[in-house]
Amino acid sequence: MDIMNRLTPERFRDVDDVLAFISIYDDVQRSYAYRHMLYSLQGLIQGAVCVEAGCGLGLFSAEMAQLGARKVYAVEQNPILAEMARERLAGFAQIEVIHAPIQEFDPPEPVDFLLHEFYGQLLYDEDLFSLDQLKFRPGYVAPNGGELLAGVFPANEFTDEIVSLDLLKRLNGVLVSGLFDESEAELAFPVMQWRYGQPFSLQQRYRIHDVDGELLAFGVQISHNGQPICRAGSCENWSHVWTYRSGETFQFTFIPGQAGEEVEFTWLDEL
Ligand SMILES: C[S@@+](CC[C@H](N)C(=O)[O-])C[C@H]1O[C@@H](n2cnc3c(N)ncnc32)[C@H](O)[C@@H]1O
């Protein structure tokens, strides 16, 4: 979905975010995985003060209320989504919708449980960074981990007459999501990981000297307590991100900004 008319930059950003966001609910596997995780954590949610960081339309805030949370703060920075969540959750006396960035939310009581889904296609490029900027320290965070996985392939396994090796070479240094059809099997090894509460380096390098192939694919995996719960390829909300392989060592740099984290990607030893 693309916005076709001219809008103020602020209105454009708010609406663009909503349009990008609503497709997550087409991802049935993602919703199932999150619900399954919440049910498995019901013992921690019952009677607890919970926060959903970035609640969207508030489906999982409602789920936490139904699982017995004493209080749920559903925090959302997008004004359109926050208003919609407020209307949709009006029937739950224990849910309070807060329109604010999670980094600015200062709860009036200790928070026992925080739920979020801040994973980008490249793991750290949506808003995991904001979880290190909180004004409160949640007793428990779910999910609490994630990995960026990768695979390297001979280009001719994927290219055709139009998206050819020649075209790929001209995209050198560019990360493109959804360029080819994907399947889970393509993601063979982890290149970076995030664990809540542990330092995450904003600049990371990885060497792939021991694998052949001109095509590199990345894909995110969400995990909780070390167990995968959702993965690019099986959860359609996350596409694989493809790039031409033109070296042995690549480097990611994440740059925190106003609308999540920007990504720089470079080959350090271009062949
Ligand atoms: C991927 S959606 C997840 C929505 C919902 N938690 C779910 O899983 O269905 C991320 C949501 O977080 C919101 N968001 C992103 N960064 C945020 C921040 N720093 N503070 C509050 N909301 C944020 C976005 O506007 C979006 O609605």
Image: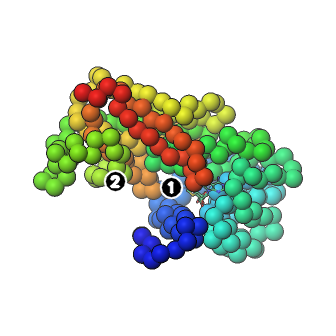
Quadrant of the rendered image holding ligand 1: bottom right
**Residue 165 visible in the current orientation:** yes
Q: Nearer the viewer, mark 1 or mark 2?
A: 2
Q: Which amino acid does label 1 sit on?
A: Arg
Q: Residue at x 71, y 71 (%)?
A: 86
Check the picture and name the quadrant holding the C terminus.
Answer: top left
Q: Which amino acid does label 2 sit on?
A: Gly
**Residue 234 visible in the current orientation:** no
Q: Element type at marker 1? A: helix
Whether disc 1's CB lies below 8 Å from ligand 1 is answered yes
Q: Is residue 186 left or right of residue 123?
A: left
Q: In this view, does 202 lie to the left or right of 231?
A: right
In the rendering, at what x and y percent does residue 183 appear?
32, 48
Q: Which residue is drawn at 77% across and 41% down?
A: 137
Q: Is residue 46 left or right of residue 59?
A: right
Depth check: 187 or 211 in front?
211
Question: Which residue does the numbered mark 1 point to in the structure image?
Answer: 30
Cα–Cα span, label 1 and label 2: 18 Å
Depth check: 47 or 79 in front?
79
- 1 and 2 marks in contact (CB < 8 Å): no
In the rendering, at what x and y percent does residue 145 appear?
57, 38
Residue 266: quarter of image? top left
Disc 2 crowd rating (10 Å Cα; few below 14, some 14-19, many 20+) is few
In the rendering, at what x and y percent does residue 248 appear?
31, 26
The earlier-in-sequence mark between 1 and 2 is 1
Q: Residue at x 52, y 74 (%)?
A: 7
Q: Element type at marker 2? A: loop
Residue 157: quarter of image? top left
Q: Is residue 98 left or right of residue 183?
A: right
Check residue 178 in the rendering and tell me which mark sits there, or answer none.
2
